[in-house]
Image (spheres, rainbow, N blue to C red):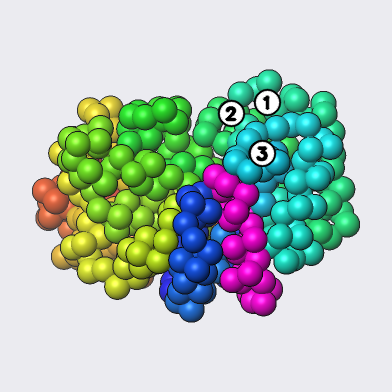
Amino acid sequence: MEYRIHPKTGDKIGVVGIGTGPIFDTTEQEAAAALTYAYEHGVNYLDFATAGAGTFPYVGAALGSVRRELFYQIHFGANYESGEYGWTTNLDTIKRQVDWQLKELRTDYIDFGMIHCLDEERDWRAYQKNGVLDYLLEMKKSGVVRHIGLSSHTPELIQKILDTGLVEQLMFSINPAYDYQHGEFAIGSASERMKLYQRCEAEGIGISVMKPYSAGQLLSAQTSPFGRALTKVQCLQYALDKPGVLTVLPGIRNLEDMKEALAWLDASPEERDYSVLGTFTPKDVTGTCVYCNHCAPCPAGLNIGLINKYYDLAKIGDAMAADHYGKLTKHASDCVSCGHCDRRCPFHVAQSDRMKEIVEYFGR
């Protein structure tokens, strides 16, 4: 497993985690096999915005004994009283549900208590008015909740909630379909979504990624909005390349799904390469570096993706970005303008010209 360190909490989080959404719909034996396999291969982050109540006892039985080696996202607003997922801002219901989930998961604490699935301004108002936010804050003060997170599909609303300074973790849908305005949750322009990722990176807010396969649509040419299928490995790599991302949480139904997600760990650079996106992304997306590093290797030894990333972060006020840039072995000033990156960039970024711009900004 590869791990990333949460900038605010210091937690060491595996880059491939588990979205538990569909796992309730299998047998307990099959669920246990998938969860045990995941644990044995270094998976340590699980999200519990699941589709059915059966998930909780499955996980409690399979992972209860190793709970303290894992990180759990539990949602204050997800309701399973009917046996299936429901959404609520009713305080009494949420209190009952949190108590029930803790009991079934065989734990007495929550790593990331999530402000759950707020997509409209009125949702946020109701969350506060009904006392749910105060309850979550009380749980954090008491030590039951260690950190506060937010799940949402709406960049504009997320920005407003991030302004409160309460949030340390964001759960957000990141995939090519949504980023390029295809699908039910493709909210916000490509640039608006990238600015959100960059803000999270700049402020040390970790991102856990939901729906990396766009609910499976990207995995089939028949359902992909691009008319081309991507692999699971490509989808995971795409999300992991975005600023701020700590872990990607593909939905797991069974052991085979878990193995396919973990195949990313042993995938070759060619298998991870998603540069094919450059052939069918919208025109307003081309010309923007997405840090995919398809331009590598640079003949002059530059890490072009990181140089671009630190430049973009510095421009939006990340105080650490200039320091990170300064510590790179090679800087934009080392560019020899050979044009190799310009020819290879699938998103048609004029990287040679951009290196000159970056030199002017940083002074080297």
Point out the tag, 3 or 1, that comes first from the N-terminus.
3
Whether pointer 3 and pointer 1 mark residues with C-beta atoms closer than 8 Å, the reply is: no
Counting from the top left corner in percent of width and height, residue 281 is at 23, 34
333 or 14, nearer to the observer:
14
Mark number for residue 45? Answer: none
246 or 225, nearer to the observer:
225
Alpha-carbon span between mark 3 and mark 1 = 22 Å
Residue appearing at x 32%, y 51% in the figure:
235
Q: Is residue 90 above or below residue 75?
A: above
Q: List the residue tagged with mark 1.
A: 123
Tell me the mark number nearer the camera, choosing from 2 and 3: 3
Q: List the residue tagged with mark 3.
A: 82
Q: Quadrant of the C terminus?
A: bottom left
Report the side of 278 relative to 103 (left or right).
left
Whether pointer 1 and pointer 2 mark residues with C-beta atoms closer than 8 Å, the reply is: yes
Mark 2: give few (<14), some (14-19) or many (20+) Cα within 10 Å.
some
Alpha-carbon span between mark 2 and mark 3 = 23 Å
Alpha-carbon span between mark 1 and mark 2 = 7 Å
Residue 89: name its quadrant: top right
Read off the magenta span.
47-73
Q: In this view, does 52 lie above or below 301?
A: above
Secondary structure state at the residue bearing disc 2: loop
Report the side of 327 relative to 232 (left or right).
right
Mark number for residue 119? Answer: 2
Point out the tag, 2 or 3, that comes first from the N-terminus.
3
Report the side of 36 relative to 228 (left or right).
right
Amino acid type shown at disc 1: Asp
**Residue 118: within the magenta?**
no
Counting from the top left corner in percent of width and height, residue 190 is at 38, 32
